[in-house]
Image (spheres, rainbow, N blue to C red):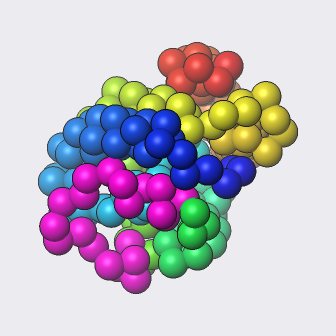
Amino acid sequence: MESIAITPEAVEEVKKIFPQIRSLLDKYMKDRGFLMSNPQIFIFLTHVPTALAISADRQVDEKELKILDKIAKSIDANALDLSLVEILSFAPEPMGVMLNEEFNLRIGSELLYISRNMDKYENDFVEAVKLLLKFDKNPQADTSMTRTFSRFMDQIIESSLALDKEKELAKVQSFKHRLGIA
């Protein structure tokens, strides 16, 4: 994602969108004891489309476990772009959010959990990712969040061991349509 310029408009957008995202994720964060900072939420939501695609057939197969493991090992909340962290600091954040080190340790198991339990949080995650995509100012660019999310979801389906690929593909297309990335 390209760097976000810190303009009064961008600050207002963050102040408006992030409380909405936090509200959508509140039940999940309370259920799991996974109280995230704004930058952690940003990172988390960039991986939710992968979990959505994995959940499409209601099973997590061996290949999908490997994908989640690889993702988990690549995440470092301390390495987030400093300008993104700065702009996200303008949005309200509760006290007692987890440290980045705890987030880094738990993110893989949380992505696995939601892949297996997506039905419980599906609408909230879809709406939260849609809100996150409002920060994608050039969705047609090859490196945009929109295109990246779509590619990740397609790759999950291509590598899936699902018995009913047609049904799984239809579910992923439904997710992509709901996210506005189809």
Residue 182: give x, y in percent of width and height.
67, 19
**In the orientation shown, which residue stands out farthest toward the front?**
8
Q: Nearer the viewer, residue 33 or 134?
A: 134
**In the orientation shown, which residue stands out farthest toward the bottom?**
101
Vertical placement of residue 106 versus 144, above or below: below
Vertical placement of residue 164 versus 83, above or below: above
Quadrant position of residue 107: bottom left
> What residue is at 63 percent from the left and 37 percent from the top?
136
Verify whether residue 86 appears in magenta.
Answer: yes
Q: Is residue 129 visible?
A: no
43 relative position to 164: left or right? left
> What residue is at 48 percent from the left and 29 percent from the top?
130
Quadrant position of residue 113: bottom left
Vertical placement of residue 138 versus 7, above or below: above
Magenta highlight range: 84-103
Residue 95: give x, y in percent of width and height.
16, 67
> What residue is at 51 percent from the left and 78 percent from the top?
78
Vertical placement of residue 61 versus 75, above or below: above
> What residue is at 54 percent from the left and 59 percent from the top?
84
Q: How many marks?
A: 0
Verify whether residue 165 appears in magenta.
Answer: no
147 relative position to 38: left or right? right
Q: Is residue 136 visible?
A: yes
Q: Nearer the viewer, residue 139 or 156?
A: 139
Quadrant position of residue 62: bottom right
Residue 39: give x, y in percent of width and height.
43, 61
Residue 119: give x, y in percent of width and height.
33, 32
178 relative position to 150: left or right? left
Q: Nearer the viewer, residue 107 or 61?
A: 107
